[in-house]
Image: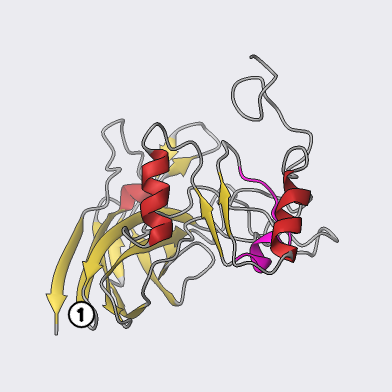
Amino acid sequence: MFGRGTSGEGCDAETLDLPGDQAALASAVLDSGVPTVLVLVSGRPYALGTLAERASAVVQVFFPGEEGGTALARIISGAAEPSGRLPVSIPRRVGGQPGTYLHARLGGHTDWSSVDPTPLFPFGHGLSWTSFTCSELSVDPVAATDGAVAVSVTVRNVGEVAGTEVVQLYLSDPVASVVRPQRWLAGFARVELQPGAAARITFSVHADRTSFTGLDLRRRVEPGKIGVAVGRSSGDLPLQGSFTLEGPVRHPAADRVLSVPVEIVPVP
């Protein structure tokens, strides 16, 4: 099977179009006017173009395993809540690159290309049966290069049914000795809320989560301003803030702090 499948080792793709006649089949079904859920069982993201806009819903299941059919049926029927989030970006067009949200500051703009690289669905995207708001961002203003800061937000279920939100914390380093990604996921919190209920979520972010490999190939934490963004996906970050790391450049060892502990406290 090496090289003969649509995904897997040795199964490269020359295009991100849906394989074979699947795009034409999906388009014909959507043209019928019958409400349609587009289900993608694949090992890679495909460029969906206008198919997603015409579908009633889109479910990306990747390769779900032997219980995948049961899980899919529960999601589509409403017996289970969809609460997963995309681990990759889904492109809108075949030529829409870069395909990862971990791009440099110019990577997400059309200044360098005539092809809009904006994804159809960004990294971290996912819907639920209800709606949530995220507000009241609080960030400790200063920390040492070997210290930690607290980042807190309030999330509220403003819909009519219970649901699960995945609050995502992203960091950015606008001035560094090497080019950094525009932002990177530093932590997340899954919180289940009844209609109208809210919770205060606090992330404990160690300075090690800002570390990177320098020109000398050593891991380093540099002093300076670090951007903070919180929201529902890498493309939906309504809360913006920052903190400042102070002190000398630090070289964390192999035991550097990689986790971001989360505290969730119900609030009125």
Q: Residue 153 in magenta?
A: no
Quadrant holding the C terminus: bottom left
Residue 206 in the image: state x and y as whole percent: 28, 53
Compared across the picture, whether 262 is left or right of 251 comes to left
Residue drawn 36% across the image and 53% down it: 74
Residue drawn 56% across the image and 52% down it: 181
Q: Is residue 100 at least partly visible in the picture? A: yes
Residue type marked 1: Ala
Compared across the picture, whether 55 is left or right of 131 comes to right
Compared across the picture, whether 115 is left or right of 229 comes to right
Classify residue 83 by image quadrant.
bottom left
Residue 185 in the image: state x and y as whole percent: 43, 54
The residue closer to the viewer here, 161 or 181, is 161
The residue closer to the viewer here, 142 or 135, is 135
Which residue matches tag 1?
197
**Total marks placed:** 1
Tell me where the magenta segment starts and ends, as one range: 45-55
